[in-house]
Amino acid sequence: MSASDHVSPNHDFAPLKNDRLLRALRFESIDTTPVWMMRQAGRYLPEYKATRAEAGDFMSLCKDTDRATEVTLQPLRRFDLDAAILFSDILTIPDAMGLGLYFETGEGPKFERQVRTQADVDNLPVLDVNDSLDYVMRAVTSIRHALNGQVPLFGFSGSPWTLATYMIEGGSSKDYRYTKGMLYSQPELLHELLDKLATAVTDYLDAQIIAGAQIVQIFDSWGGALGHRQFIEFSHFYNKRIVSELKLRHPDIPVVLFTKGGGLWLDVQADSEADVLGLDWTMPLDRARQVLTESQRQLTKHYKKIQGSKAIQGNLDPSTLYASPQKIRDEVKFMLDSAYASGNKTGYIANLGHGITQWVNPDHAKVFIDAVHDYKI
Amino acid sequence: MSASDHVSPNHDFAPLKNDRLLRALRFESIDTTPVWMMRQAGRYLPEYKATRAEAGDFMSLCKDTDRATEVTLQPLRRFDLDAAILFSDILTIPDAMGLGLYFETGEGPKFERQVRTQADVDNLPVLDVNDSLDYVMRAVTSIRHALNGQVPLFGFSGSPWTLATYMIEGGSSKDYRYTKGMLYSQPELLHELLDKLATAVTDYLDAQIIAGAQIVQIFDSWGGALGHRQFIEFSHFYNKRIVSELKLRHPDIPVVLFTKGGGLWLDVQADSEADVLGLDWTMPLDRARQVLTESQRQLTKHYKKIQGSKAIQGNLDPSTLYASPQKIRDEVKFMLDSAYASGNKTGYIANLGHGITQWVNPDHAKVFIDAVHDYKI
C-alpha cells in the first residue's frame, strides 16, 4: 500500500503568503532572489541548542512534535528566510527499517546493524511510512500549521544511494569500503537494496507531501563518491524514478535534487523530472546554467515532451560565513552575478552549497540572507 | 639557497630499460599502455607489513634508507609495473618545519603543533631540504640504484594547499574549518603560508630530481574541497608556479599534477607546464581528453609558445579491485577504450584514481596491471 492510499487528512492550512521561492523555480518573475539555508535549524543557533537539551538526544528531538516544530521555526524568527525545512534526519528510513540509528558525540550517525548480505537485504521490511515514520508526518503537519502560510515548507529524504552507504557501512565512511565492495562484486544485491530504498523514499516523500510539505528535496549527499557510469547506474537511476513517481502522484509539488560533488553530472541529472538541481560550491553557477541549457536542447531531441528548464539552487561555500560581513556580501554578489549571467533573472534559489556548520555566528548567516535580498535583480 | 646550488652528486645510475611511461607522456608511440598504482608500496602487501613491523612506526620506515628502498621495490617484484615511486609521506615538509608529525592508529596523520596565526606562519623555518630532509634524498638515490634502470622512479610532494590544510587543521579534516576560516577571513596570511610552502615544495622536488627522481608528481589531494575561484587562487596558482620553476631547473623532467576531485578544473590545470594531469574516477577519460584539447586550443591564443598537449593519468576507482578478476578486466577495458577514444593511441598512463587501499587482494592488483598491458592499443 502506498502512502497515497491513505485517506488524505483534511488539512485546513493558511494560504501561502511568500511564494517567491516557488515562483523562481517556475521561472516566473520575482521581486528579489529567494534564499534559505540547508541545516538552517541547527547547532549554530543557541536557541536550537537549548531546545535540543530539553529534548535529550537528537532523535528524541525529531520525534517530539512540538519541539521539532519549535526548532524548525527558530531560524525564521531571526532571518528573512523564504522557506522552512522540516526538522528531521536523512537516516529516519533505515532507522524505521530496524537498523538502530544512534549518534555518538563527534562521531556522526551510526547503526547498530549493517546491511551486507542477501539475508540482510531480504530481511529489510517494506515500510508503512505512515505507521513507522508517523512522527515525521505529525511534525510536517504541525510545522505547516505553525508557519501559518509565512513561507513554503520543504520535506526531504536522503537518496537511496546515500542511505545505502550508511546502511552498508554502519555509519559515515571515508572510502565506502563495503558499499563499493558490494557495488563492484555484487551489483545485483546492491540494486535490490536500492530498489527497496527507492520505494521507501517515494512513499516517504509522498506521505510528507500529503502531510503538508509544499516542496521536497532529495539529498544525494554521497553521490559524488561514485564514478561517472556508477553514478548513473546506482544513484541517478533511482533518484529519477522517485521524482517521476512523485510527479505522477503530485504533479504540482516541486522537487529539488541535490548531489553533493555532482557538478560533473549536471547533464545526467538534467534527464529527470526534477524542477531544481542543487549545487555545491565547486561548480560555478554560470557554467551550470550553460550546461543545463545545452542538456535541455539535447534532451528535447529525445523526448516528445519538451523538457522544462531546470532551476538551480546553491551554492555558497558554508565556510564563507566565517568571513567578515563585507567579504560575505562580496561573495554573495559574485554568486548572484553568476546565477543571472545568462540574462534570465529568475530560475535560481540562493542557498549554501552544503549545510551551515555549527561554528557559524548567526549574525553572519543574517548578513548572507540579507545580502541575497538586497541584490537588485 | 636552493637545492640546485648544492653540488650535484656524481651519480652513476644504470640506463633506463623500460621507458614506456616516459614515451607515453611525450605522446610518442608505445607498445602497450604504461601502468603504475598510487600507494603501490603499502599495507595491502604482506611483505610491506613485515618490513614496516621491523622498522617500527611509519616515519621510522621512511627514514630507514634500506627498508624504504626495500618496500619501494616490493610491488615491482610481484607486478609488471612501469614505474616505481619513492616510499615516503606527503607530510615530510611540515614535519621538517618542526610541527611534529605523528600517526595514531586508525586516525590518520596528526601534528603536535598547528599553524593558525601570523606568528605561527612567521616562525616556520625556510628549509634547507638537503639538510632537514636528507633522509628522503638518500632514499631516492638508494632506490634509483636498486632499480638498476628497470623502470623510471617517481619523486613526489604534497601540494602547498594540501600541506596547508594539514598544518592548519593539525591533521585530516572533513570540513577544513580552520583552513577555510583563514582563507575567507585572512587570505593574505594563507597566501604567506602557501608562498613558503611553494618554495619548500619546489626545492624539495628539485632535490629529489638531483638525487635521482626521473619524474615527479604533485599530490593536490584536497584541491577538490575548494570552490572554483578559490581553487585557482589558493591551489592551482602555487602548483603552476612550482611546475614552472622545476621546468626552468630541469626542463627534461616530466611533472604530473594530480588534484583529487579536480575534474571540473581540467581547463584551469591545463594552464600550467605540467606534462600530465592525474584524474580520479569521477571524470570520464574521453571527456577529459575533449576538455584538454579544447583548453589547449584556447591557450594557444593567449601564449606565444604553443602549449604542449597534456597527457592524462588515472583513473580506475581503487574499489574496483574488490571485484572479481573478470569485472576488473571489464572495467580496465572500458577505461582504456575511453582513454583512447580520440583515436590517439598514446598520451595516457593507466593508474588508479587514488591510492590502493589496504584491503585489496594483491592478486587483484596483478589482474589490473596485466589487463592494462594485455589491452591491444
Image (cartoon, coloured by chain):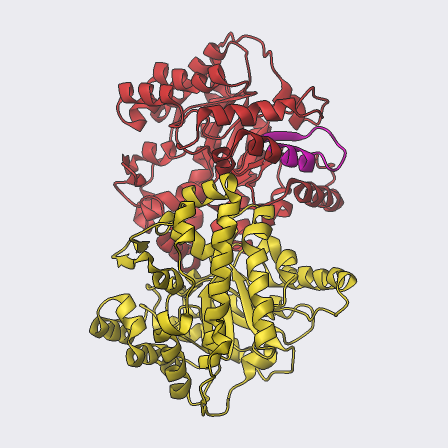
Chain colours: A yellow, B red
Q: Nearer the viewer, residue B54 or A304?
A: A304
The residue positioned 65% from the left and 81% from the top of the image is A28
Q: Which residues are magenta?
A: B332-351
Examine the image and state in which quarter residue A85 appears: bottom left
Q: Position of residue A253 (x, y in %)?
A: 56, 77
As drawn, is B173 to the left or to the right of A348? left
Task: Indicate whether B196 appears above or below A21.
Answer: above
Quarter of the image containing the C terminus of chain A? bottom right
As drawn, is A71 to the left or to the right of A324? left
Q: Nearer the viewer, residue B230 or A35?
A: A35
Q: Nearer the viewer, residue B91 or A77?
A: A77
Q: Position of residue A285 (x, y in %)?
A: 60, 63
As drawn, is A225 to the left or to the right of B116? right
Task: Indicate whether B300 appears above or below A287.
Answer: above
Q: Is residue B333 magenta?
A: yes
Mark yes or no: residue B352 visible. Answer: yes
Q: Position of residue A131 (x, y in %)?
A: 37, 73
The residue positioned 68% from the left and 45% from the top of the image is B287
Mark yes or no: residue B34 visible. Answer: no
Q: Position of residue A299 (x, y in %)?
A: 73, 61
Q: Is residue A183 magenta?
A: no
Task: Indicate whether B161 appears above or below B187.
Answer: above
